[in-house]
Image: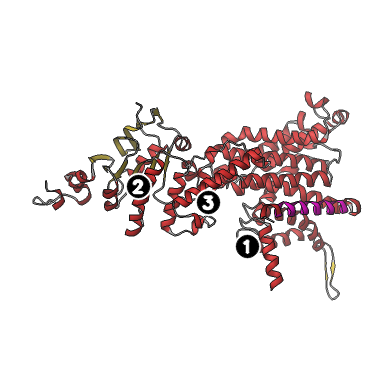
């Protein structure tokens, strides 16, 4: 059996296993567990698409919260029933097309992705005129602009009051379906000729140009693809938590994503997935340390905020012992796993 | 007949400094021409002007009858002029094979979404790129290192990989910036043979910068000498060796009674 066939079989198998696990949780899991799994899938989508620009193209882009916000608001405005919208917009009435439209969920999340992509396209011209720290500042600025707009443009976003009572459409199948599709599509892109061109730009932009690569076109491609998936994830997030407001999408959101991909390993899709899983699950698992712990001989009182202390310590441990993140720039592969298992059997 | 390649009185000024002044050159298909000069003479600047990393203050670059002055580098490469770099600039974290495959990307016809969905048209093209890249590696004797990281290669092979990468863009004019720098005499000799064979195999015109005089004199059919941005001599290796201006630029004022054996008429 050759490698390619084996990988296809193993990939199909692992997706089937994932489906099985999701089904079990869907049937027997508590709401809390399901919520964590949904969060996990959404963070995987966000981290993998964010990693495309930051890790693969090597551009420190600090505005994914803008794309997520746009995706979330667009989808929310589309799925909400017109009557509900009329009730919600009490300070200023909603502007025209949104007062009447009522779209199905699939269409709404796609629209969320497209809206984020259009926005990314508009800002790409100033963004990719600069590089390095300047690019970071410009994207950070655009992220802030979107948040401020959400606060101020009351006839579209309902301002600081936000959008409430969205239908909780996001379930395990939606969130994990999107996550798996994102991983597959972005991995294929990274391993393609286009992905090689992006990595070449990361390694040495001058040499890449001399080899006929147009940096703007390829950075734009990565930026738009990343924005699309971030927008879709934003739409899913909105319909998971059912209430969105501008305070949800501050720079802290971007910062969390950045920590996820740095801990996972900048430039590694597997790393982004691992980072997202650890973040979504670990954040909840660490709640234990905030409750009172009775060790028999000593009682530790529950301290709120202890979670973040432990989280920071873990962060530092990762950075000390794995300076380039858990995966570095390596990717998970079946070859690697099988070789490891064989060695394990022998030893 | 259209001009193959012509530089018409290129001038490059950086602030008050004139790095290159009035540089003119015409290349004919298949020629092997050298550009020499002391350090800081402006040789690499000439290369940067040709491939579009710099836009000349005045003057023009003609390529296949078209004025390509000031076009961005990726467009120049796509039109068939490739270069290597004096200080090696490989994509260090990528494999040797990937380095070469990057150069074949600009010919890619399949769209990115075809790649994302793994559609047959893309996969066919990718397979072709893979094979072609392996061909170039074989040509330069690097095929057995295809899966190594580019940064792990020894120096001489990194230089070879630079040439392989430039060749893979399918150039008709190849610009080599100090290809023999840091090589030992044996490697240099091999390199000269390699450049000759590549030229005939791929119908290349080669324009190179080099400090190794033995290498240049043995390889090039025509040589141009730059000093402080000014062309001080041009001609066959024989003529250049005897040119008093050149000797002065390299060695300073000759003694009145001086003169080397080879230059006696």
User: Mark on residue B97?
Assistant: 3
Q: Residues within 10 Å of mark 3 (few under 14, many from 20)?
A: many
Q: Secondary structure at mark 1?
A: loop
To the question of a shared chain for discs 2 and 3, the answer is yes
As measured in the structure, the alpha-carbon distance from the residue carrying label 2 to the one carrying label 3 is 24 Å
**Does the stretch in magenta take in A20?**
yes
Q: Residue at x 25, y 39 (%)?
A: B231
Q: Would you place residue A13 above or below residue B222 in this image?
A: below
- How far across and down, in percent of the image, does residue B118 sit? 67, 42
> Which quadrant of the rendered structure holds the N terminus of chain A?
bottom right
* Disc 2 residue crowd, few under 14, some 14–19, many 20+, Cα 10 Å: some
Q: Is residue A15 above or below residue A148?
A: below
Q: Number of callouts in the render?
A: 3
Numbered mark located on residue A322 in the image? 1
Instruction: Locate residue A77, reporting x and y percent.
Output: 80, 32
The residue segment tinted magenta is A6-25
Q: Is residue A122 left or right of residue A104?
A: left
Residue designated by label 2:
B196
The chain under label 1 reads A
In this orientation, which residue lies closer to the viewer: B116 or A31? B116
Q: Chain of mark 3?
A: B
Name which quarter of the figure residue B26 lies in: top left
Among numbered discs 2 and 3, the one appearing first in the sequence: 3
Query: Which corner quadrant holds the C terminus of chain A?
Result: bottom right
Q: Nearer the viewer, mark 2 or mark 3?
A: 2
Q: Describe the element under mark 3 as helix, strand or loop.
A: helix
Q: Position of residue A72 (x, y in %)?
A: 76, 38
Task: List the single residue furthest toward the top.
Answer: A96
């Amino acid at each position: 059996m050759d490698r390619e066939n084996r990988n296809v079989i193993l990939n199909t198998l692992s997706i089937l296993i994932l489906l099985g696990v999701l089904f079990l949780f869907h049937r027997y899991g508590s709401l809390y567990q399901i919520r964590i799994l949904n969060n996990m899938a959404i963070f995987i989508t966000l981290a993998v698409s964010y990693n495309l620009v930051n890790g693969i193209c090597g551009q420190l882009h600090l505005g994914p919260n803008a794309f997520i916000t746009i995706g979330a608001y667009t989808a929310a405005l589309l799925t909400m029933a017109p009557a509900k919208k009329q009730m919600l917009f009490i300070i200023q009435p909603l502007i025209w097309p949104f007062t009447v439209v009522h779209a199905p969920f699939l269409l709404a999340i796609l629209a969320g992705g497209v809206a984020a992509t259009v926005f990314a396209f508009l800002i790409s011209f100033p963004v990719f005129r600069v590089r390095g720290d300047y690019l970071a500042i410009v994207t950070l600025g655009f992220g802030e602009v979107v948040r401020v707009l959400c606060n101020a443009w009351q006839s579209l976003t309902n301002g600081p009051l936000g959008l409430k009572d969205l239908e909780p459409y996001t379930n395990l199948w939606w969130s994990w379906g999107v996550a798996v599709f994102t991983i597959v599509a972005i991995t294929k892109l990274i391993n393609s000729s286009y992905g090689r061109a992006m990595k070449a730009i990361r390694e040495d932009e001058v040499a890449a140009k001399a080899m006929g690569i147009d940096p703007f076109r390829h950075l734009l491609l990565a930026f738009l693809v990343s924005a699309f998936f971030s927008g879709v994830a934003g739409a899913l997030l909105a319909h998971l938590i059912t209430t969105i407001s501008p305070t949800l999408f501050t720079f802290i959101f971007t910062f969390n994503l950045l920590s996820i991909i740095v801990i996972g390993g900048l430039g590694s899709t597997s790393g982004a997935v691992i980072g997202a899983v650890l973040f979504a699950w670990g954040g909840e698992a660490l709640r234990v340390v905030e409750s009172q712990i009775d060790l028999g001989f000593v009682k530790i009182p529950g301290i709120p905020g202890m979670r973040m202390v432990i989280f920071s310590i873990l962060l530092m441990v990762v950075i000390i012992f794995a300076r380039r993140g858990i995966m570095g720039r390596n990717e998970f592969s079946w070859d690697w796993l099988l070789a490891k298992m064989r060695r394990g059997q022998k030893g | 007949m259209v001009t193959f390649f012509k530089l018409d009185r290129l001038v490059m000024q950086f602030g008050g400094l004139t790095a290159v002044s009035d540089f003119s050159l015409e290349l004919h298909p298949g020629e092997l021409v050298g550009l020499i000069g002391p350090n800081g003479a402006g040789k690499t600047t000439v290369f940067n002007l040709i491939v579009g990393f710099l836009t000349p203050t005045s003057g023009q670059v003609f390529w296949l009858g078209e004025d390509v002055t000031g076009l961005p580098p990726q467009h120049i490469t796509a039109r068939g002029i490739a270069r290597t770099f004096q200080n090696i600039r490989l994509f260090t974290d990528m494999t040797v094979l990937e380095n070469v495959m990057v150069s074949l990307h600009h010919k890619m016809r399949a769209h990115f979404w075809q790649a994302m969905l793994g559609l047959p048209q893309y996969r066919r093209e990718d397979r072709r790129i893979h094979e072609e890249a392996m061909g170039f590696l074989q040509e330069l004797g690097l095929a057995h290192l295809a899966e190594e990281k580019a940064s792990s290669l020894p120096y001489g092979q990194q230089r070879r990989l630079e040439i392989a990468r430039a060749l893979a863009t399918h150039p008709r004019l190849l610009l080599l910036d100090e290809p023999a720098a840091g090589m030992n005499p044996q490697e240099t000799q091999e390199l000269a043979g390699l450049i000759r064979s590549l030229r005939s195999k791929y119908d290349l015109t080669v324009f190179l910068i080099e400090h190794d005089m033995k290498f240049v004199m043995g390889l090039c059919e025509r040589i141009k000498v730059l000093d402080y941005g000014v062309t001080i001599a041009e001609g066959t290796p024989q003529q250049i060796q005897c040119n008093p201006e050149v000797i002065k630029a390299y060695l300073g004022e000759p003694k009145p009674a001086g003169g080397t054996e080879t230059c006696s008429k």
